Image: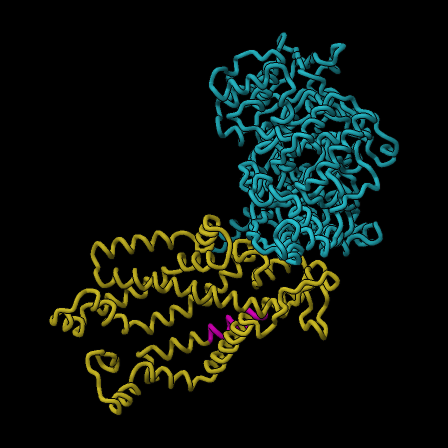
Chain colours: A yellow, B cyan
Amino acid sequence: MGSVNVSTHTIPVAEEGAKANRNSLWWDAYYRLKKDRIAVISFWVIVFYVLLAVGCRIGLLFPHFAETNDALSYAAPNANHWLGTDFLGRDVLARAAHGTYTSLLVGFFGSGLAVVIGTMFGALAGYFGGKVDDLIVWLYTTVSTIPYILLVIAFSFVLGAGLKVLCLVLGLTGWVGICRVVRGEYMKHRDREYVQACTAIGASHFRKAFIHILPNVTHLILIQFSLGFVGVIKAEVILSYLGLGVEAGTPSWGVMINDAAQELPREVWWGLAAATGFMFFLVLAFNLFNDALRDALDPKLKNK
Amino acid sequence: MKQFITSMIILSLAWMSLTGCTKKKDLEADTLNLALSANVKGLDPAQAGDLYSNTVIAQIYERLFSYHYLKRPLSLEPRLADGMPVASKDGLTHTFKIKKGIKFQDDAAFPNGKGRELVAQDFIYAWKRVADPNVNSEGWWIFDNRIVGLNAWRDGMKDGKVTYDTVVEGMKATDSHTIQIKLIKPYYQLYYVLAMNYTAPIAKEAVEKYGKEFLNHPVGTGPYMLKSWVRNNKLELVANPNWAGQTYPTEGEEGDKEAGLLEDAGKKLPLIKKIVLREITEDQPRWLNFMKGNLDVAAIPKDNFDSSVVAGELTDEMKAKKIELIITEDPDVTYTAFNMDDPVLGKNKKLRQAMALAYNGEEVIKKFYNNRAIKAHSPIPPGVDGYEKGFSNPYKKFDVSKAKKFIEDAGFPEGKGLPTFEFMAGSSSTSRQMAEYFKENLKTIGINLTITQNSWPQFTKKIRERKGQIWGIAWGADYPDAENFLQLFYSRNASPGANGSNYENPKFDALYEKAALLPPGEERTAIYQQMRDIIVEDSPWIFGAHRLGYAVKHGWLKNYKPHRIIDDKMKYYKIDKDLKAKLKAKL
């Protein structure tokens, strides 16, 4: 087992426990992440976005995002509206800020659903092998042969628009990558000594697959989740841009970019700038943080 | 050696591409390139209910009558008919001769693939299809309760008691080239209706061969035939060698000669051999393609208006490119329709009136039409009889406080107790923006909307199947008579007919039936106005605007004189190839 000490059978006394934890994968990862300045900055950027989204949602920040004003249609950036207004005279900065909530929500639930489905299938396929494996591999190869965006579009056509549907659609289409990784990991783990030991003392399949093996692949799932997060955010923007995403009226970066196609000919650049700017920093922060996270959680890179 | 071979390959490739280019360019130059702003549903004349499908169908099929291309006001002239018809004294029996020697286009549906001659029976067949409940035509309203025995035949088809071979008393082919129509009562729009695509003759063989696919396999007698169609992308039409032909008109209205519209007088049509119609639903790609010279004509999108038109004229930059501005006054009306079948919306007049009062029509005209439209107070647009200048609809003004009072009277103070309504919008960004604006308008009186975006075929399907709740749409005139707009409220025309709102009012119906028996004149106009007042009071629609068409065309497109009602127009267009080569190089 080496350094991966996550056995749940030995419950050490408190002081010893703290020491043991400090040697765990998670502590290692934490220390390595802390040393990486870019990762730390990225992390705080993400935290900032999350706070922004929560603040918008509970009405603390930009409560007037939906307020329209016919007289102010397409106002250029000014002291009252730092990033100008859109065709209905709504504040672009407020729209973009509220778009953060939409994006993070879809990212969290879309990616979360994908992780649940992918982990379930991956675990079953990798753990049981044989017919179950064949079936699941067949399923995900079939799904992955359909170009991703087309698949998402097909789903949205059937299920309609709206935030909930969007999370569902992105979750139902985004699980293949996670499934592959988890399946591979399970195949590696299922014959290890600790699993054999479990079998010897009579643990059930469920217990072995989800209580013993799962914690040992959690770090991979975490990485996949945060990678998927970025992908889902981008997919939401693309779908909303195509008119298949959130319902009209909901603030969304994709819708803002869609509007920009109409605005640019009138030299209204602020809508596009706000939406892409907000998206750029979030996606960049996520990608940098993911890289660092992956490095930190990879035991093979431990001594580098 | 290796190098030699490579250079040979490069040389031969270059040579091939060069020759390829010249040939392609020649063909390209003589092609009309147009865009349709919504997807085409299908090319069956019985379903020619929307502008986009109709535009294509009109180039492939022909009718008994069509309109003179240049004369205004519109003047009807025979197309497949051989001269104007003969009517009996009581105006109830009309006899039409059809031209001899007209042939259908070559098609696999005919023996040996050769198009056969058009006969009177092809008209009867097509008209029966419009009446056939199984075809479910959008055009049934044109014949409903008009022709002796046709309604009975329609009912018979429902029970399977009659077939297409059953003779209908009021619609007979008396010989191979003569049709006789017997009317139940006078029908003053009959000849107009016979200039609509619904009435285009159809070869039975084609319907039998293609079945459901007939929608994608038009077989007509017109100047063009469908060469290929990639759905939701583009249609290619080529000249039909079997077309009986026609010459360019030699006279027009005043000013046509000066405008160069008579330069091709007497020439054999069509003047362009190939048409490419691209289905581009978004404004900006359409506009950019036009500016690159890939399209010959385009409407000016709202967002490009300020940068292309200044004080009613094109900018100097555009003029230097020999781009011309075309302003048309098309009789049309935009509106927001309520489905009167809806248990909440349909039963509550005050609620609908409240919504009409909350709708800021002036701002819509400013925001989305660049002030290129006038406020619509009724369904009757300027340019047709029954339009009354200065008529004011009491619910067609933006008055939030009054709207709030109305919604209270309707039993839903501040919108409490009302469900969230579904508003159907089109798929384009502009359509969504208009829906968002309407949503904001209604929010001020406490009414909530969810907006769904639909492709044009989806959109019309939902209306036909009565699944819509509230939607935004427009109606353009089929013929220059207010009756064409008022029939949109006649209960017998309810979905799948043109009365998409499914409005029903016996008083209105009675007036409609009364007016139908009257010749054009003051008495009829007075009844039209009575009908208008009923509609205004009942508010099954929120009236939007009567639009002015602002379009631009390139200098190389000649003989371009648009009118909403004239649809078989592309055969008259001409491309000045030399000018196009010269101008396009500079774009």
Quadrant of residue A272 within the rendered picture: bottom right
Quadrant of residue A11 within the rendered picture: bottom left
- Residue B334 image position (x, y, % from top left): 70, 43
Q: Is residue B330 highlighted in magenta?
A: no
When the figure is inspected, residue A278 is found, relative to residue B148, above or below; the finding is: below
Q: Is residue A31 left or right of residue B116?
A: left
Q: Is residue B529 left or right of residue B417?
A: right
When the figure is inspected, residue B421 is found, relative to residue B384, above or below; the finding is: below
Task: Out of A37 and B143, give the one closest to the viewer.
Answer: B143
Give me the residue at 50% from left, 25% from top. B134
Give me the residue at 32% from left, 72% from top. A218
Magenta stretch, overall SS: helix
- Residue B45 image position (x, y, % from top left): 60, 28
Residue located farthest toward the left when viewing the structure as drawn: A200
Q: Is residue B141 left or right of residue A221?
A: right
Residue B361 makes an appearance in the image: yes
- Residue A90 image position (x, y, % from top left): 66, 64
Residue located farthest toward the bottom when viewing the structure as drawn: A15
Q: Which residues are magenta?
A: A277-288
- Residue A30 image position (x, y, % from top left): 38, 83
Task: Out of A225 and A147, give the one closest to the viewer.
Answer: A225
Task: Out of B166 and B38, give the one closest to the viewer.
Answer: B166
Q: Is residue A285 highlighted in magenta?
A: yes
